[in-house]
Image (cartoon, grey):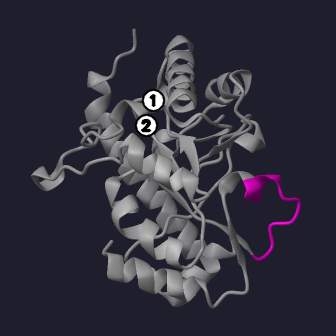
Amino acid sequence: MTPKLFSRQITGLLSIPAEFMTITRYLTDAVHENKIALTFDDGYESVYQHAFPILRQLDIQATVFINPAFVGQFNTWDVNLGYLRFRHMNWRQLQQLQSCGWEIGIHGFSHQDLSRLPESVVKKEIALALCVMNSRLQSECRVISFPFGNVNETVARVGREQGLTAGLTMSRRPKNVDPAFSVTRLGVYPFDGRHSLRYKALRRGTTVQRMMQKVMDVCSDFTVFVKQKNWNID
């Protein structure tokens, strides 16, 4: 997504009589009507370079979910289509976002699909992510965005045991998972127009939009299929 397109989408959202807030504030608020929480997964440097200046000018705070193992590094966890690599934000950039009211959450430690890992590895992934986050940003993290939007009952339980209070997916809401750890979202894509964004922002997504999100989620599983053989599961 280009900065120009992102700016146009945000401008479109401003036509909605809604309040923007971080994800923790959104989740703890009893009433969600006319309230929007912008979230960015992976913590790419482009968020700092392009989205942050636009949102700061509008006094909008958002939430970014990071993988501490890849802070300041290229996204070697992802499938390399077209031989393109993208860099993640470094700690200095994350600290600046935080100082401007942004919330920083975890996206696992090394972007592995937690739902496919043994419980012992899930514990390490979450514990390491929280430890590094708290050390580098001097703040307690309470929300996780699950890599690839995948979670199961074990992952949710481990997250709560380690002090997390909520977990985000995309379209998937598995059975037997604590609802607080299967909070669904609708992604925003370059093809989203003004009306599409309005429905998504107000959590009134159409059946077509929800089906498209399911398709996008299935596409993300391609990375899991290709990369999981390289994951550390010791």
Image quarter hosting the N terminus: bottom left
Instruction: Tell whether 22 sits left or right of 90.
Output: right
* The disc label shown at residue 109, or none: 1
* View extreme (top): residue: 234
Q: Main secondary structure of the magenta part?
A: loop
Q: Which residues are magenta?
A: 25-34
Q: CA distance from mark 1 to mark 2?
A: 5 Å
State the residue at coordinates (29%, 37%): 77
Instruction: Tell whether 105 sits left or right of 112.
Output: right
Instruction: Tell whether 162 sits left or right of 65.
Output: right
Instruction: Tell whether 210 sits left or right of 69.
Output: right
Q: Is residue 123 above or below residue 207?
A: above
Magenta region includes residue 173: no
Q: Residues within 10 Å of mark 1 (few under 14, many from 20)?
A: many
Q: Residue 57: image x %, image y %?
A: 51, 78
Image quarter hosting the C terminus: top left
> Could you tell me if the residues under marks 1 and 2 are in contact, i.e. CB atoms within 8 Å?
yes
**Picture quadrant where residue 79 is located:** top left
Q: Is residue 129 above or below residue 212?
A: above
State the residue at coordinates (44%, 59%): 215
* SS for dot 1: loop
**Could you tell me if residue 191 is visible in this image?**
no
Report the amino acid beneath label 1.
Answer: Phe
**Could you tell me if residue 119 is visible in this image?**
yes
Q: Nearer the viewer, residue 21 or 165?
A: 21
Q: Residue 152: image x %, image y %?
A: 62, 32
* SS for dot 2: loop
Report the amino acid beneath label 2.
Answer: Asn
* The disc label shown at residue 67, or none: 2
State the residue at coordinates (45%, 48%): 94
Q: Residue 162: image x %, image y %?
A: 68, 22
